[in-house]
Image (cartoon, helix red, strand yellow):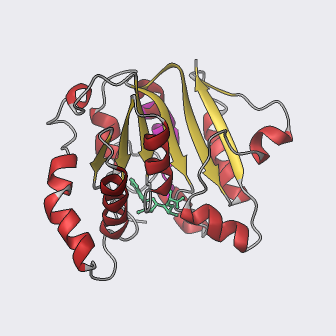
Amino acid sequence: MSAGEGESDPRRRILYGRSRGKALRAGHARLVAENLPRLEFEPGASDLRTLFPFAPREFWLEVGFGAGEHLIDQAKANPDVGLIGCEPFLNGVAVALAGIEREQLTNVRLRRGDAQALIEAAPDGFFSRIFILYPDPWPKRRHNRRRIISEQMVEALARIVKPGGEVRFATDIDDYAGWTLARFLPSPMFRWIATGAADWRTHWPQWRPTRYEEKAHKAGRASVYLTFVRL
Ligand SMILES: C[S@@+](CC[C@H](N)C(=O)[O-])C[C@H]1O[C@@H](n2cnc3c(N)ncnc32)[C@H](O)[C@@H]1O
């Protein structure tokens, strides 16, 4: 484990995983060159409240949106909500840009990079909903601490989610569901709203399966859906 990697280090800023894959197709390269600069922002330098060309009813964040299918679907279904998507993997960002253009969405802004800086820069109580869907599982024990959910992350999320707002977490890895519960349940700032197994076995209403969910279900792995309400 490298210095600063541990869950105990709140300044952790190391990005694990890929930020780029195979060369972009010409259409995607054009979207990255022409549209991304218009939709991207720099956490800390931009005022998140004025990112959109209208005053959104609420702000929602999707951390690690992959290829953006869920982000685009939510944006389409909730045109009065400002959606911010954060994803370091350029090829995924390019696919999301294609969706934004195809659907002519004006309520999506993107941050290409690590979610940590964005979370640190967000104002208190800014987000009404945060999605963390199928985060990288880091299944090997020695890599567990690379998981995006940590005690510090729960604290950071508690600061930026407004009371009554929600963190929605999904995984197909049982061990990661347990890991996440072990970090949210002790927090006095969140309440897990499940009352029975149906709550964590059933996806949220108006749900577009993500690419990883589709892969997981095809491989026979079930999903766990956890909703944490900010108190
Ligand atoms: C297993 S994939 C899931 C993608 C998508 N949510 C889905 O369900 O299809 C995890 C995603 O999280 C992204 N990711 C990893 N570390 C991240 C970080 N620190 N901040 C934001 N996204 C991150 C990865 O690039 C990857 O796209």
Report whether residue 180 is seen.
Answer: yes
Compared to residue 23, the image places residue 19 above or below, namely above
User: Magenta part mainly helix, strand or loop?
Assistant: helix
Q: Is residue 37 magenta?
A: no
Task: From the viewer's perspective, tell me whether residue 171 is left or right of residue 165.
Answer: right
Q: Residue at x 31, y 36 (%)?
A: 120
Return the residue nearer the eye: 71 or 41: 71
Compared to residue 103, the image places residue 29 above or below, namely below
Quarter of the figure with residue 186: top right
The magenta-colored residue range is 147-156
Task: From the viewer's perspective, tell me whether residue 206 is left or right of residue 108.
Answer: right
Compared to residue 136, the image places residue 199 above or below, namely above
Compared to residue 127, the image places residue 68 above or below, namely below
Quarter of the figure with residue 191: top right
Q: Residue at x 58, y 65 (%)?
A: 212
Image quadrant occupied by the C terminus: top right
Q: Quadrant of ligand 1?
A: bottom left
Q: Residue furthest bottom?
A: 22
Image quadrant occupied by the N terminus: bottom left
Quarter of the figure with residue 221: bottom right
Task: Locate residue 86, reporting x and y percent.
Answer: 35, 50
Report whether residue 187 is seen.
Answer: no
